[in-house]
Amino acid sequence: MIRIENLSKTYITPQSSIKAIENINLQIQKGDIFGIIGFSGAGKSTLVRCINRLEEPDSGAIFIGDKEITAMNKKELRFARRKIGMIFQQFNLLDSKTVYQNIAFPLEVAGCHKKRIQSRVEEILELVELTEKINAYPSQLSGGQKQRVGIARALANEPDVLLSDEATSALDPLTTYSILELLKDINKKLNLTIVLITHELDVLRHICSNMAVLEYGKIVEKGSVEKLFLNPESETAKQFVKIIQSFQGGRMYGEGGGI
């Protein structure tokens, strides 16, 4: 479904050049929930933003299905992006627009008929369980509700791929769980391929089937999530597993001195 070949991206600053990602090779199967994990600065967000060319890679190729995203001109890319939804950590909602208007916006840009927009918005709101908030403004919503609107907007044009860039990082644990369950439900109902960027190992374990570990812009490990937990190979993966094991141990044997 998604194939990335020899992808590299360098940022040039007045003082230096920074290799954000280097020689990335990756394949993600259709219908998979694929996690990309790494510490801050590992290149995770750059990689996911290259998939829909919000960031322009310096070299390499990206294919979604049989279409090469990196070879498209601006007009072709505009149409291709309609089938690549994206959700963000900070929601990116339009504060002056209602929930309905936020979700309708990409459909209006695509030139859809008003009746089609109305039926699609109502359909998606039911899917994300926010029908009663259709006329609310973002300021009237909780963080979890805002992210559900963000997900609904990303689904408006019936995408084949959903990119999630740290979508739960700003949420509390209970809300994070509800959003992850929603993404799992969407993946199952729509057979949607989801690429999920995170630095939270619990998120990876809860929702993803397969994963890649980024370290200083390079993939240092990939495979099943089960493999990462049972037999981590890279230094980054070992550190992640050690951190979560220490945290769980602290919860078991901490403050009260007992289990």
Image (cartoon, grey):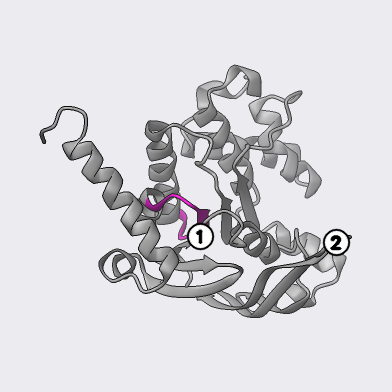
Residue at (17% x, 38% y) in the render: 253
**In the image, is residue 200 above or below residue 232?**
above
Residue at (54% x, 28% y) in the render: 143
- Where residue 26 is drawn, which disc sits there? none
Where residue 209 sits, quadrant-wise, is bottom left
Residue 10 percent coordinates (x, y): 76, 69
Which quadrant of the figure contains the N terminus? bottom right
Which three-letter amino acid code belongs to the residue tagged 2? Answer: Gln
Which quadrant of the figure contains the C terminus? top left
Is disc 1 surrounded by few (<14), some (14 to 19) or many (20+) residues within 10 Å? many
- Which residue lies under the disc numbered 2? 15
- Taking 253 as reference, is 217 left or right? right
Q: Which residues, given as a range, are shown in magenta?
A: 190-201
Residue 133 percent coordinates (x, y): 56, 22
User: What is the C-alpha distance between the residues marked 1 and 2?
Assistant: 26 Å
- Residue lying furthest left in this view? 258
> Of the residues under marks 1 and 2, which one precedes in the sequence?
2
* Residue 115 appears in the rendering: no
